[in-house]
Amino acid sequence: MTASTPSPLSGKVPAAVADRVLLQVGHRRAARYRGRVDASSSGLVLTGNGALAKAGQLREEGFDAALLVDEGCYRVAAASEEAPFPVLDNEPAPLFGAPLEHLMLAHLAFADLALTPTGYLHAGAIGALEAAAARVTRLGDPRVVFTVPIDASWLHPGQVEYLAEVLHRVPRSKAVLVGGRPDARGAAGGLVRLLELVPGIGVLRAGLGAFGGLAWGAGFTAFGGDASMRHTVPPAPAQTASGGGPGSPAVLFPELMDFFLGLTLAKRFDGEAPACSCEECQGERLDRFTSMAQQVPAAGHNASSLMVWVRRLRAVDAADRAAWWRQQCREALDSVAVWNARIQQLSGFTVSSDLSAWAELPARRTAARHAG
């Protein structure tokens, strides 16, 4: 199902990903999601070192939905003016061709588009941003997406306008990932402002901003399949892993538009869990994901539920999507209060700061968008 009034950017965004909300997942977990992706409106962004090889495997196995590869180079090193693509610029060059071109062609063997391996752009890294933009422009390949992993401070007033100015210099597709520890309200408002200035850009590795972004004029977005895929962490020295992971998978409670551990849902519902009608659950209750043995069906439920959101959003006229999305968020806020009154527990369901931010954001029309 597509929007009854197509986005005015439909001819400006690569057709393979235009108007889609993709699922961004760690490449080792691709099998959990691939069967629940709606090939007509979504796809996968495989993430991490090894994602390119996994993309080749998926294509060999017949996966034909939209597919992108994000090797997460911004998690390894920051961009600089001398090395805006540090994993390439700090390594020996290939025997033939420019390093960036060589890597992008490798991605395009399996992916629909190639995401540049841009390093993390810390606050004020103007030289690095400009150097990366210039390199991508010289490359001149319409299948290459200028991928811009920015610290959240780039979305502040003054900085966001300069970021937009540089992005306009790149005539091809571009996409942003927001890192650091942004204030939810400021991040949502800053992202909307960027989309007003540069409509049609992509928004990757996002949470509710993936849907809010598409509602506000993004050309395509990606929602993180798990919490680590819904934000971007700046590069940091290697740390020892902490023990004691969760005892149950994270489960999307669609009515509240938020994720909760399966054990938490079972405790909150106390035997009165609602039935879920998604393709994975098919009427089963939401309180059954109580151990890590249910990771795969939990992922299937999450993906299936998100696909419902994607189809509903795409069915709304482009000019009305921002208002529609804000209304969905407001209804979810109301549902939190309703459920807490129903379960009557001291530690009831909490409201995420992201949900509050998108619910409170003024809904302006998106019909007057112009191509970036």
Image (cartoon, rainbow, N blue to C red):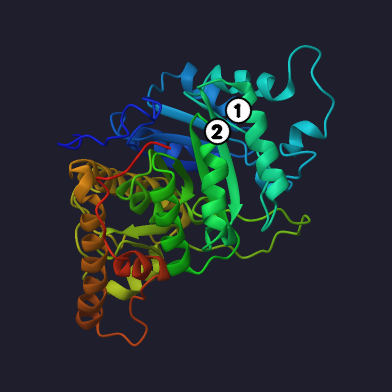
* Secondary element type, mark 2: loop
Marks 1 and 2 in Cβ contact (< 8 Å) = yes
Q: Amino acid at mark 1?
A: Thr
For the C terminus, the quadrant is top left
Q: Amino acid at mark 2?
A: Val
Count the marks.
2
Residue 263's place in the image compared with 30, above or below, is: below
Is residue 32 or residue 313 the one in the foreground? 313
Residue 93's place in the image compared with 7, above or below, is: above
Question: Viewed as shown, does residue 195 lie left or right of 151?
Answer: left
Residue appearing at x 37%, y 83% in the figure: 347
Pointer 2 residue:
170
* Secondary element type, mark 1: helix
Q: Can you give x and y, in whole percent of width and height, for residue 315 in the image?
A: 18, 41
The answer to whether any part of residue 163 appears in the image is yes
Residue 322's place in the image compared with 49, above or below, is: below
Q: Can you give x and y, in whole percent of width and height, for residue 19 in the image?
A: 32, 36
Report the disc number at residue 137.
1
- N-terminal of the pair, mark 1 or mark 2, is 1
The answer to whether any part of residue 207 appears in the image is no
Q: Can you give x and y, in whole percent of width and height, for residue 350 in the image?
A: 36, 76
Question: Viewed as shown, does residue 170 lie left or right of 75?
Answer: left
Residue appearing at x 59%, y 62% in the figure: 153
